[in-house]
Amino acid sequence: MAIDFTVNGKATSSEAPPTTPLLWVIREDLKLTGTKFGCGTGLCGACMVHIDGKRAFSCQTQMSEMVGKSVTTIEGLSPDSSHPLQKAWLAEQVPQCGYCQSGQIMSAADLLKQNPKPTRNQIVEHMSTNICRCGTYQRIVRAIERATREA
Amino acid sequence: MTQHVTLANLNARAARRSLLSRRQVMVGAAGLSFAVVLGVNRRAAGAVLGTEQAGKGLSPWVSIAGDGTITIMSPATEMGQGSMTSLPLIIAEELDADWSKVRVVPAPVIEAIYGNPGFGGMMYTAGSNAVTSYYRPLRMFGAQVRRVLIDNAAKKLGVPAEELTTEPSVVVHAKSGRKLSYGDIAAFAEVPDKAPEVKPEALKKPSEFRLIGKDVPRVDVSGKVNGSARYAIDVQVPNMLYGAVLRAPVEGSVPDKIDDAKAKIIAGPVRIVRLPYGVGVLADTPWAAFEARRAGAEPARPGVSTAKRAWSGLSPMPRTPPVVQRNGARWAMRAVRCRRLLPPSRPSTAATTPITRKWSR
């Protein structure tokens, strides 16, 4: 049974088994590999996407829940890397290995949507869903603060 | 344009020592050519490595296009420490390249050319070693390409090469005020068979550096903020299979009996591979491989959260089980063969404990 949903503004249909996590449909079928597989258990945040405008772990979201939903991945955050967070991420040279950064940026974008002027504590609290093994947390916070100033 | 670089009879050490005779690297007897290597690897590596150089190849490291775009090979793996920026930057420094026109591409796996001198010529990135080990050879390679450009410009302008200097990506004849861009020169350049000799003392003095020591943004960051950076896990090739490993629940145990019936029902066609330390599962999709791996533990129940089911596979470690049943495999204990890392616990005193002692296996 095909599941119809929207990804980055495009109508999409998936034949994947309904128990398949959204993550694998995004990565393997739609070839949008910016969204990463990290832990597979909703603990690290590398797979973070937006579903109907709110952040969600794509590894914890089954396709059966996706009927009619709208997904935004890192590739769809802006057409040309011009989202204020992406610009701030460049300015602060945030990523090291970069593997977690798609998820970090998607989480941060969710925060700024809810709260355009978060305090430092609110940033840290909100971003606690995302782990960075390189330890770029200080830069992440700086980049979010920069984006709130420059947005 | 794909370069044809022949590797026959070349070993990494010789290539390194000669620093490099271009003839040695680029021309040889029969054998494997750069193009063949790319061809073979195209399906596996071509997807992730845009190794083809644009423009005229002036060395295995540098090619220059008519529009002035300079493509420089990066020989090390970028793991976030900036190798992909710093190593090509060293070449660009001695080449006197306009950094804004440099495009960095990962070098193909040809250790004879791109190997790390600090690791016996292997293409191996570790231990904060890349810049230290590549620093001297890369400066020389950059300087050699600059010399080729100067020699060609001298011929074109009909002036002695000694009268020419360079500014970023431009050869300048100060006496006559004439200039030739690197892109223009590349279009007509004749590349010598043998790399021109550049004496170490002819390299730039640190005070002349335009790039080294400056704060230069990393070239890999832009792809890491929009999802376009490609990691090994992102490479997809036609008909590829995905593997998952069910590891032994107790160190030293091996699968005694494997029942893959449930795995096949749940995940479709899968292949089971017996491993010395566990059971491998091969499937068409990653998710099918994961599903098959845990299929033996309990039947898949639609609606059960994936997280819970993943954790259910982690049963507490049994103390001394002769046989363990887990995830469709029956595990038999085998004598633990690994080296004992800790000393046997027994009371010791300063008087009876020598300062150093060797532990037998």
Image (cartoon, rainbow, N blue to C red):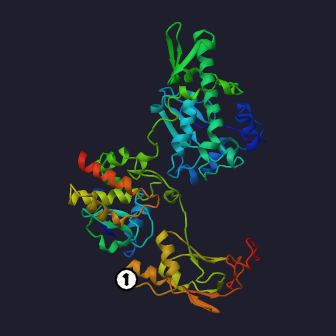
Q: Is residue B22 left or right of residue A91?
A: right
Amino acid type indicated by mark 1:
Val
Return the x and y of residue B308 as percentages of the image width and height.
40, 81
Mark 1: few/some/many CA within 10 Å (<14, 14-19, 20+): few
Residue picked out by circle 1: B304
Q: Could you tell me if residue A111 is visible in this image?
A: yes
User: Of helix, strand and loop, which one carries label 1?
Assistant: loop
Return the x and y of residue A121 as percentages of the image width and height.
27, 61
Q: Residue reaching furthest front? A: B351
The residue under the point 49% across, 51% down is B80
Q: Is residue B182 above or below residue B82?
A: above
Q: Residue reaching furthest top? A: B176
The residue under the point 49% across, 24% down is B168
Nearest to the observer: residue B304 or residue B15: B15
Nearest to the observer: residue B58 or residue B140: B140
Tell me which corner region of the image, top left, top right, bottom left or bottom right, holds residue B142: top right
Return the x and y of residue B129 as percentages of the image width and height.
62, 48
Image quadrant in which the N terminus of chain A is located: bottom left
